[in-house]
Image: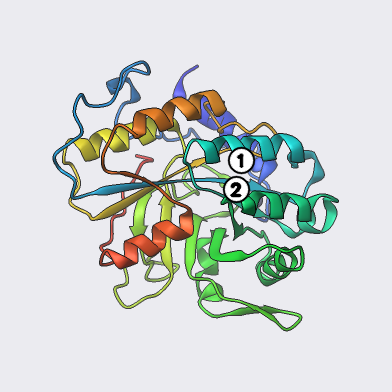
Amino acid sequence: MKRPLLLSLILILITAACSFASPSPAAPPPAPTIASVPPTSIPAEASPAAAPSSNDATLLYISGTTHIETKPQTWPNVDAFLAFLQKVADLGMKWSVGADVGWLEGEPRAAELIQASEALGVQWDIHAHSGEDRAKAAYLITQMGGHPNSVVSGMLVDELDSVRQPLTYQGFTWTPKVLWGGTNCVGHRPGCDDLSAGIWIPLSSEQYATHDPNGTLVRVGGGTHQLDDGRALAQAVANGQYQYPIISFTVMVTPATLTIFESGDGIAEISAFVNEMNQYSFVRWANIEETAQAWTAAGSVPSRIDQDQ
Ligand SMILES: [Zn+2]
């Protein structure tokens, strides 16, 4: 299948699983291609650059994440998900989970999954489709023995001002510090999702891609989540293409199938990807929040990289 067709399929799947506020139109316009670097430039079987690059100026921080939605049809099997999280932890990956309030309130084993995953080093981000539910999600995770971090995992770009201050639910306060996965328009239509990699501080909803040196909410870009695009990003770093101290990329699997949208890649392909990435001296495995913290510590140099052109 050609990539644009695949992407259209994926957008439909994403829309079904993770629709922000309104349905997408029946017939979406042609989708853009995802990668700025043709994936064919890196054969699947090839090992990375023969020797680790001498250009270690740019560090590539790679995170992993999963969103759990409110609709029960999309929920993970708890045992299968824990087994998956154990495997990625064994690989050295740092994973996070963002679960909407429907799952937090409705899954009988939510507390068990939260606690068992945290014991594996998994962090809990805040993923809620309704702005008022963000503090509630953090509250519920805390009630179940978990420790929600400061990551707003998924939001509409025009919600930016609403997460600039501490949020409260029944006297509980949750303070956002990190943004991941912004979308410019509802329904995950082509052109809506911000698929950029890299890290910056968005100036405003209107100028979201512009870095604000005086701002505080750090936007961690996850890129396209496709392993081949992660490979291309690593190869670009190895080639000395970037001058930034730190750039970012996120592997994301859907909870029901534990595979990546579009490619269908699962734990076997992710394992191979990790082994390839570990041959690069500049790759770091970190949660989304840890990536933001490392970026700040390294001087907050904006590093937005478009992967959807
Ligand atoms: Zn969602």
State the residue in front, 55 or 196. 55
Residue at x 49%, y 48% (from the top left corner): 193
Looking at mark 2, is its residue's CB closer than 8 Å to ligand 1?
A: no
Give the farthest residue toward the left.
54
Q: Is residue 175 above or below residue 148?
A: below
Residue 102's quadrant in the figure?
bottom right
Q: Residues within 10 Å of mark 2 (few under 14, many from 20)?
A: some
Residue at x 76%, y 63% (from the top left corner): 144
State the residue in front, 183 or 218. 218
In the displayed structure image, the side of residue 198 where residue 183 appears, left or right:
right
In the displayed structure image, the side of residue 261 where residue 201 appears, left or right:
left
Looking at mark 1, is its residue's CB closer than 8 Å to ligand 1?
A: no
Provide residue 182's location: percent of width, then percent of height. Answer: 50, 56
Provide residue 170's location: percent of width, then percent of height. Answer: 76, 80
Element class at badge 2: loop
* Label disc, if present, on residue 85 of the rendered structure: 1
Sooner in the amino-acid sequence: mark 1 or mark 2: 1
Residue 11's quadrant in the figure?
top right
Q: Is residue 294 above or below residue 285?
A: below
* Label disc, if present, on residue 120 of the rendered structure: 2
Q: Is residue 197 above or below residue 261?
A: below
In the displayed structure image, the side of residue 50 where residue 213 appears, left or right:
right
Provide residue 282's location: percent of width, then percent of height. Answer: 27, 43
Q: Are marks 1 and 2 in contact (CB under 8 Å)?
A: yes
Amino acid at dot 2 = Leu
Residue at x 67%, y 59% (from the top left corner): 129
Provide residue 177's location: percent of width, then percent of height. Answer: 48, 70
Amino acid at dot 1 = Leu
